Amino acid sequence: KAGYDVHHRFDGGIIDISFELEPTQEVADVVERREQRADSRSIARLLQPRSVAVIGAGTQRGSIGAVVLRNLLAEGFDGPVYPVNPTTPHVGGIPATASILDIVDDVHLAIVAVPASVVPQVLDECALKRVRGVVVISTGFADAGPDGAAVEREIVERARRNGMRLVGPASMGVITTSIRDRPGALHASFAPTGVLPGRLALSLQSGPLATALLEQARRIGVGFSCFVSLGNKGDVSANDLLNYWSDDPATDVVLLYIESFGNPRKFLRTARRVSRTKPVVAVRGAAYGVDAATTDALYQQAGVIRVNTVAELLDMGRLLVGQPLPAGTRVAVITDARSPGVLALERVRFEGLSVAELGVDTRTALHAALPASAMLQPLVDLTPKAVAADYRAALLAVGDDPGVDVLLVIHAPPLLGDDDDVAAVIAEAAATSGRTTVAIMLGRGDGPLREGSGVPAFAFPEPAVVALARAARYAAWRQRPAGTVASLPDVDHDRARALVDHALAVRPEGTLLPLSVTRELLACAGIEFAPALAITSIDAAVDAADRLGYPVALKAAGLTRLVRSEDGGVALDLASADDVRASYARMADHLGPAMAEAIVQRMAPGGVEVIVAIEHHPAIGPVIGFGLGGAFADVIGDRVRRSAPLTTADAVEMIDGSRARAALASAGVDIDALIALLCRVSALVDAFAEIDQLSLNPVLASPSGAVVVDASVHVAPGSTVTTEAVPTRRLT
């Protein structure tokens, strides 16, 4: 059941059972499924409680505890609610206890709204009461500086020791609009705005932002199944919530506002799994040390739909929860106003979507049903005289066209507010066509098209098209194969470990590996390096060239950046011993100490120069980059990034997303060899956290394979990035 390959043998009355302890992908998958179930059940205790205690529920009007208690009662929580306050016998007309220990019945969830100094004692009492879920609204912990952070670590450790899951500190609370098998809702928050029921789940860290977002959501009619304010993320994180929402029957779409990654490896694994069945939309602030390109790479790899603003977060949510995913990128625009229609067309093209070409049958039907003044391409312009019947005819005809994936319907009423009949027609057509449908109702704000309809209405065309484009890209991602982390049985893990350990034993602070060690380390991972020898004299250079075979290249080992000239540290196509001697003499005279050690390398077959590079990001871990290589790789800036470990699908996307793709295709390059190279590099850095920088540049990609011509590897003491709670993947 743990995923190991078990062999049984019966001999002489003895059953012999053997299995390799080496972690495999199957073992990792089993561990992940078990972790997901455990996370889901622990979060369910927080979000689906049968009883709630509000510790710190006060009598002072407007106090946090009083507001939480009032909200719990006002939203109809179907279970006992216990105010805890040592200074008063009643709170809001409900008998209060001095301590949670004085409550006779079981308490499933405790909301803590007391001064920070009292929180440790309260958690101890919750532990004695066997409470399994705690939401700490109190502030004054990591949000207050280093001393507060130390106390926060202490209370989180107390909660974990006693089997409690903890949301916060500095949380705004939790809201669940549907308690399973029971009526009512859980509004355990001091949010001043009521939450509409719906099928979106929302998690944020920022309390003030949450207040504004919930208010805006209510204003435009967006409802939620669940809302969780994570605060300082002392214990419960977005990863835990994703594991819960992945199986939550009340949730169809997950919205996240992420300010920091607690465990990026786990986020990547979890979000990629959840995104295969439920859309995950995230907006992330840029002030927390992770550049936008790296964050984009992580989100794209996981299938997460990244948006730039909180408003776009809600736009994506209401589109995804109300409409089917686009079957493709072909958009038909139907409008009674040409100017907004043209704006929509321009944005469609800008976002990488395509304008649908209507079929002959569709055009024939439209000509028969619409006034002669109507225009059919590139948009269906019904003219300002259009009425609801014209919209109905256009939507029926275009909605049946097999060449249309998305219907973008624009309505500009002659009189503001006079759009109910057209809205009804759009809603009816969307319900029957099966096409992704979005409405732009000019003169009206964002919101639902009409009550009971899942069609989102936008005030202007541009935001609608942006949301559609993101939905189409996500739909395409879901249709791609998931890929697997490649199994590499031919790798010498033990030798690679010895090389890394020896380098750090000599230079504990970290070091750039000598080329000879770099070549051996790459060879341990099965990465082909063009044959080369290190030399320290002119005679050794000639001897090395004779042994390797001509033509050869001569490179100065003392330069960090090589240019294809002798002055830049590289002499190419040396065809004889005399060529080697002459080049060595000139380079030694010009470069001096940089030629104290040099490299003689057999010339590799020609090919497209690409780069494979690794940077160890402090918040994410090893990030792999791929793109056009050579001396000007950094200037070109062609770098597609993904987080390790790579799946085969990740490697394919990196190659396809690079500007190098066109050159690789025209040269007939062996793409499978490049995929294998990326997967082997990923496995190497995934197995050895000490490899914090690696650059293979150039790699010559040709029809015969991919050969590394030059490489550098830097090792340093182990990574500080949070590690995931699964077996460490070894190269074998």
Image (cartoon, rainbow, N blue to C red):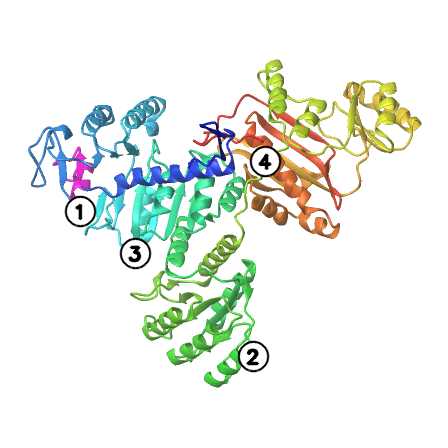
Mark 3 vs mark 4: which is more N-terminal? Answer: 3
**Mark 4 Cα-neighbour bin, 10 Å: few <14, some 14–19, many ≥20:** many
| Residue type beneath disc 4 | Ser
Q: Which residue is mark 3?
A: 219
Which stretch did the figure color magenta?
51-76
Q: Secondary structure at mark 3?
A: helix
Q: Which residue is mark 1?
A: 77
Q: Nearer the viewer, mark 4 or mark 2?
A: 4
Q: Which residue is mark 4?
A: 682
Residue at the image position 33 percent from the left and 38 percent from the top: 230
Residue at the image position 18 percent from the left and 29 percent from the top: 129
| Residue type beneath disc 3 | Arg
| Residue type beneath disc 2 | Val
Q: Label 1, label 3: how many angstroms apart (C-alpha)?
A: 24 Å
Q: Label 4, label 2: how many angstroms apart (C-alpha)?
A: 51 Å
Q: Position of residue 190 (x, y in %)?
A: 23, 42
The answer to whether any part of residue 48 appears in the image is: yes
